[in-house]
């Protein structure tokens, strides 16, 4: 049976692959299992996502049967003329003999050759908004992608594109609706868009850096990046008189301010229901980030006073990124701190047992990357106090 017949005849595969019950990585593995029955020499399927805000292409999910995955890898699409052209022209690329076709000029080209991959097939994928990313098929055989295989793999690419664009679109809608909710509540300035952009990019860098230690997948890192900007969504439920108050809060006001965490969890719970995401396994990290971004490892945080391992890694990452950005930007009551000053404070908090020391070490080693992010997303409006 051809792949096409097998694929079309098997609705259950499509249903399984598109179902929200399994993570995108799990769905790709299942699809790869099925594909191997028809085309046994596809050793790797990987998908990289494009982010137009910084022209980056980032590894997202992969199913690798031979060779070692290339984890948490990203580069500017404009740095690869060949891939830029594929994205622009919606054209596919088949390389029959990688060792001759690829120059070892980039990390990913060298990595492909080192893994023993001999041929590859690359398909750009799109959604309604435009270019979404690439699906890469690699084989350790030479000439593994004759025309008929290419036709079959285009069908598989469609399926991968459908599941990923569904997931990306859902997250985009979720983020857009929370943004709208903030505007509706006239609170859009309580934390600037630039703060959210910066801290989510910082969080992504930290997550990538601690990924080997905590065994975080690329998909997990991407979820941290997507969900980090929603950490303070609960502030839309805090009265202006407290949220926008200049000067220090009374004990009663502080309790109300701190209730933004539980309000955030309520809002997220409702959005998850409204968007039909209850079965989407990765919303766990959304809840963890919203619910635990003020917890400290020594139990001194709020609202639950969680200790140590009970504080999820996604929240530790977001907390470190959020505090770093608060320290290094101007607030109504203070000038921006330098990277070195902020780091000294974060290291003090790590030594006191509050922050994850590995997340802080990740910030220490990412000064140059953080500087680029800070310069790229600058505040244009005055910043109001944050809890
Ligand atoms: Fe907060
Ligand atoms: Fe924040």
Image (cartoon, rainbow, N blue to C red):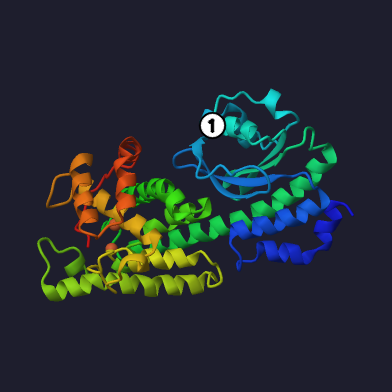
Give the position of the C terminus as an image quadrant. Answer: bottom left
Q: Is residue 123 left or right of residue 255?
A: right
Q: Is residue 293 left or right of residue 135?
A: left
For residue 349, which quarter of the picture?
bottom left
Quadrant of ligand 2: it is bottom left
Q: Is residue 337 above or below residue 280?
A: above
- Residue 350 at x, y percent in the picture: 24, 54
Q: Determine the residue positioned at 29% across, 74% down.
A: 304
Tell which of 302 and 156 is nearer to you.
302
Q: Determine the residue positioned at 73% across, 62% down.
A: 14
- Residue 224 at x, y percent in the picture: 43, 56
Q: Is residue 225 above or below residue 372?
A: below
Q: Is residue 193 visible?
A: no
Q: Is residue 237 left or right of residue 11?
A: left
- Residue 254 at x, y percent in the picture: 17, 71
Residue under numbered circle 1: 107
């Amino acid at each position: 049976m051809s792949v096409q017949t097998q694929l079309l005849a098997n609705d259950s595969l499509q249903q399984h692959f598109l179902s929200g019950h399994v993570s995108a990585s799990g769905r790709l593995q299942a699809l790869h299992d099925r594909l191997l029955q028809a085309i046994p020499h596809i050793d790797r399927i990987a998908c990289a996502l494009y982010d137009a805000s910084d022209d980056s292409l980032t590894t997202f999910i992969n199913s690798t049967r031979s060779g070692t995955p290339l984890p948490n890898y990203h580069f500017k699409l404009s740095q690869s003329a060949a891939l830029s052209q594929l994205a622009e022209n919606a054209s596919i690329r088949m390389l029959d003999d990688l060792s001759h076709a690829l120059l070892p000029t980039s990390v990913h080209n060298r990595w492909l050759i080192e893994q023993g991959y001999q041929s590859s097939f690359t398909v750009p994928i799109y959604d309604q908004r435009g270019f979404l990313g690439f699906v890469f098929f690699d084989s350790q055989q030479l000439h593994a992608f004759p025309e008929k295989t290419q036709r079959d793999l285009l069908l598989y690419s469609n399926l991968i594109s459908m599941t990923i664009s569904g997931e990306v679109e859902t997250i985009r809608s979720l983020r857009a609706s929370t943004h709208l909710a903030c505007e509706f509540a006239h609170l859009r300035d309580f934390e600037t868009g630039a703060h959210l952009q910066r801290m989510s990019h910082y969080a992504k860098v930290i997550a990538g850096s601690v990924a080997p230690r905590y065994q975080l997948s690329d998909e997990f890192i991407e979820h941290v990046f997507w969900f980090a900007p929603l950490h303070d969504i609960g502030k839309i439920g805090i009265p202006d008189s407290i949220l926008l108050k200049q000067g220090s809060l009374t004990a009663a006001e502080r309790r109300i301010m701190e209730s933004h965490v539980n309000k955030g969890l309520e809002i997220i719970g409702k959005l998850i229901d409204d968007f039909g995401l209850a079965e989407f396994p990765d919303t766990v990290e959304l809840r963890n980030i919203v619910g635990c971004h003020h917890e400290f490892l020594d139990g001194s945080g709020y609202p639950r006073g969680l200790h140590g391992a009970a504080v999820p890694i996604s929240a530790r990452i977001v907390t470190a990124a959020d505090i770093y950005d608060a320290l290094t930007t101007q607030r109504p009551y203070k000038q921006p701190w330098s990277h070195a000053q902020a780091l000294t404070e974060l290291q003090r908090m790590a030594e006191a047992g509050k922050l994850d020391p590995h997340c802080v070490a990740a910030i220490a080693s990412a000064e140059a990357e953080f500087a680029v992010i800070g310069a790229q997303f600058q505040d244009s409006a005055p910043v109001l106090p944050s809890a």
